[in-house]
Image (spheres, grey):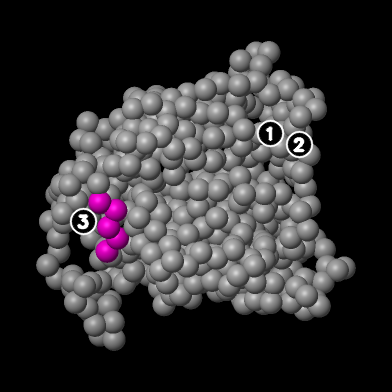
Amino acid sequence: MKRRISLIIILVINVMTFAVNANERGTNEGESTATDDVIFDDYFIDKTLRIDYIMAGDANNQNIYLSELKQQGRWAGRKSRLAEKFLNGNGQLTVRDHATHKVIYVWTFSTLFQEWLLENEAKTVGRAFEASYNIPFPKSAIDITVSLTDKHQKVMTEMTHTVKPNDILIRQIGDNGIPFYYVWKGGARTDGDGGTKENEPRHGKNRNYVYEEYDAMADVNLTDCIDLAIVAEGYTEAQMGKFYADCQRAVDALFAHEPFTSLKDKFNVVAVAAPSMDAGPSVPHKGAWKRGTSGAHYDTFYSDRYLMSQEMHRIYDLLSGVPFEHIMVLVNSNTYGGGGIYNQVTFSTSDHPTFKQVFVHEFGHSYAGLADEYAYDDQDSEWYPSDTEPWEPNVTTLKDFNSKWADMMPKKQPIPTPLDAGVPDFKKIDKNNKKDMTKLNAATQVVGVFEGAGYQTKGCYRPAQECRMKINEVENFCPVCTRAIRRITEFYTAK
Ligand SMILES: [Zn+2]
């Protein structure tokens, strides 16, 4: 298998790695797995149960092990549609009330472990990977089933364990002393424009931004907003001013793109200023190993631009004092790279010229489960088998196209849709040529079924000729990606 990154790069490969047939599993985007609504207060208290797992094995045999249970502060996740599965992902936590077996919470995700299983290395050696998940803290005993699925949506391994909320070995964690600062506060704020201007912390003595009396949590609406935490990697204590400024640029980039612009009131963004002992990233192919915060390094699976960490427990430890739902690790680096895992973590770099585009692209993967819409000419492995409709909302194998964007197709648009020869080639385009750039950007808004997506030139289709999930040269998401982001945001913020 090749992990070669050419156009947009960053591989959130595992977002697409295990394509699944949503229908085989009985649910599809937005469909409910529950027979009736679960009332949050009937089953949970306003705290977070963090569950640490080890996922281990090789290409032939996989196992999931419980590592540790932890209780931390307020629950930042959704409080409605608790038993619903929105996107399948490549794995799932299913939480059942122990007494009645009723499903009371579902969380889907992808893992680095499953991605690694497709590497040649997995044929010859077994390895262990960390995973961590947050669920609302239960009032009574619960049974948690963790399952991982293959690209045909078949369960490859599964384990179930019981959690009793009064278990004395659930470690109580909380404030870890790492300062944090909200770069953006959404929700029903009285000043009407969100942001943090009125309550901005002054520069502290050692921490640059945060000073002792500053209450970072003031006016934060956890319930109505999606909570994104940006964690510092490769920033020393003295560089925290830069970190906050970089976070601000990241958030500005995100909110400059629709549909995030119009959804920005539904997000909180908190910058977590975890200091590294050394500045900059670990770059193994240059022999550079730095003492950072998150275990991040380039060269994951020997792919030089694949910036990722296997140390999820450590990353969650950095966030023990912060309510969060989604994690972005911002790496202090000007080297191109990144990576993201659906509903687990995303890595992006701060100082590469394509910083903004990559950040938004990566967030599309990890937040909305969007697949890459580009293809490699010489890709020799099939990521999306033809007998299975991918779970990602923006690619299709045409196995079940009606579950995708069939309703958004213009009349008489052929399937597959031929490329519009009038759209300039992004590889040859002169960015200063306004006419060509206008044509290129316009191509993002024409919906069709274009062959070539998910790293495959054949058998996998994308919704637009160009899109933010395909190339860095265009600003906009295609209409199908835009709808997917809107829908998942509605799901997370439903009342
Ligand atoms: Zn798209």
Identify the main secondary structure in magenta: loop
Queried on whether the Cβ of the residue with tag 3 lies below 8 angstroms from ligand 1, the answer reads no
On the image, the x and y values in percent for residue 480 come to 35, 52
Residue 4 falls inside the magenta stretch? yes
Query: Label 3 sits on what residue type?
Result: Tyr
Where residue 372 is drawn, which disc sits there?
none
Q: Which residue is mark 3?
A: 376
Q: Amino acid at mark 2?
A: Arg
**Mark 3 crowdedness (10 Å alpha carbons): few <14, some 14-19, many ≥20:** some
Quadrant in which the C terminus appears: top right
- Give left or right: position of 369 versus 397: right
Q: Is residue 37 left or right of residue 137?
A: left
- Looking at the image, the residue that sits furthest to the right is 213
Magenta span: 2-6
Res. 69 mark: 1
Residue 482 located within the stretch drawn in magenta? no
Seen in the image, is 24 located left or right of residue 348?
A: left
How far is mark 1 from mark 2, CA to CA? 6 Å
Q: Is residue 301 above or below residue 81?
A: below
Please state which of the two labelled residues, at mark 3 or mark 2, is closer to the viewer. Answer: 2
Task: Locate residue 2, reporting x and y percent.
Answer: 25, 51
- Which image quadrant for residue 173? top right
Q: Which residue is mark 2?
A: 171
Task: Write the residue at 58% across / 72% down.
Answer: 279
